[in-house]
Image (cartoon, rainbow, N blue to C red):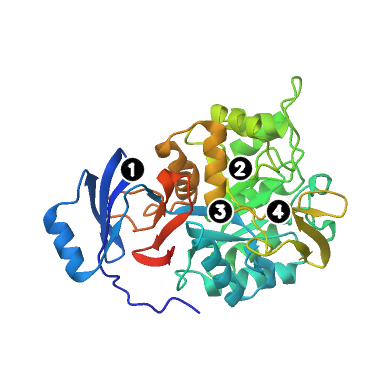
Amino acid sequence: MPCTADPTPPPLLIAGATVVAAEELWSPGWLVAAGGRIQALGPGEAPGGVRAEVTALGTVVDGRGSVLLPGFIDVHVHGGDGADAMDADPDGLRRMARFHARHGVTALLPTTWSAPPSALEAAVAAIAEAAGPVEGGATIAGAHLEGPWINPARAGAQDPAGIRPPDGAEARRLLDLRRGVVKLVALAPEMPGADEVIEECRARGVVVAAGHTEADWGEMVAAVAAGVRHVTHTVNAMVGLGHREPGTAGAALALTELRCELIADGHHVHAGAMAVLARAKGPGGVVLISDAIRAAGLAEGEVDLGGRAAQHCCGAVRLADGRLAGSVLTLDVALRNFAAASGWGWPDLARAAAGNAAEALGLSSKGRLAPGLDADLVLLGEDGAGEVLLTVVEGRVVHRHG
């Protein structure tokens, strides 16, 4: 169901945690939220007056031994808990939002696959209906179209039957649907007609990603000049780095205008390659994603991918020919894996899990911990190495462990 909670959440104080603030790291520190916004935060112990007021009117959370971060933002997530964006079911999308909130996500973009026009339009319409705060779940911030305008030679697990050349008229229909719910479009920039679609996206403030592509260095440089600013699940479903032709992956690593998605599940990308990406792009250039499908959160077994069978086993989902088909990853696990691979500290990890996505999408009130911003928070146990203890979306506790 849509969020019907009281529009003014009660005060919330998280005290004693390591606080990853927008400009500083405090251990210990504190943060107080009220009315859906961060009111104040600082180092050391919370002021006595603040603690007394929140104790009387709201909730005090003991954050000792844990890490407080901005809530994660997943810009590339197909499903979870049995639901998928292509089901075109608003209730399923809300179930998906609740599932990912249990893993620290406070905002997400349900992501479509390549499919016939009617199926895509139905999926986008359902996302528009479910968009906004979800009771007990993450905010649905819009839709991400991963295809259908991709290169069939790099289809990956996408159904070739749904892939077609970029078409400006189709792009206009989808982008204008339901007051511009589409926020991110992934396409192959080398395909004829891509320039027109990129321009349609730019005109509406929609972020364009290069994905499922065979674009070479020159084509990627041209794509950036045309307005591409994002790379879909970097190094997957694209031309790899070569010493005579840097390829799509080389351009993704080298071109500073591009932010790079990363599926840090240990199946899609080796830890060493994650380290290369971290070194090449720096803290402002990595966007952690789940690329999760409906099997995320479910027991192992057979998975339906739009009528095609896949197998969920050993932490991955594969088609019969062995190709990876999305993931069962959650962003809390992605963060731990990327932290181990990159060696980054909490401020940089917070950018990879939240801040960079917020900047890419223009979500100026999300992705950082600072006064006046949305109280989108995640508290991780065991000094950040443990499970999600608390998820807060715009001041409301949507998940609390135990």
Q: Amino acid at mark 3?
A: Val
Q: Evaluate if marks 4 and 2 touch, with contact meaning CB atoms under 8 Å apart.
A: no
Q: Residues within 10 Å of mark 3 (few under 14, many from 20)?
A: many
Q: Mark 3 sits on what residue?
A: 75
Q: Evaluate if marks 4 and 3 touch, with contact meaning CB atoms under 8 Å apart.
A: no
* Sooner in the amino-acid sequence: mark 3 or mark 2: 3
Q: Position of residue 232 (x, y in %)?
A: 65, 45
* Sooner in the amino-acid sequence: mark 2 or mark 1: 1
| Disc ID at residue 262 | 2
The quarter in which the C terminus is drawn is bottom left
| Disc ID at residue 22 | 1
Q: Label 4's element?
A: loop
For the residues labelled 3 and 2, the Cα–Cα distance comes to: 11 Å
Q: Amino acid at mark 1?
A: Ala
Which residue is at a point 41% across and 50% down the rendered structure image?
367
Q: Evaluate if marks 2 and 1 touch, with contact meaning CB atoms under 8 Å apart.
A: no
For the residues labelled 4 and 1, the Cα–Cα distance comes to: 32 Å
Q: Mark 4 sits on what residue?
A: 326
Q: Amino acid at mark 2?
A: Leu
Asked if one can make out residue 387 in the rendered structure from this viewpoint, the answer is: yes
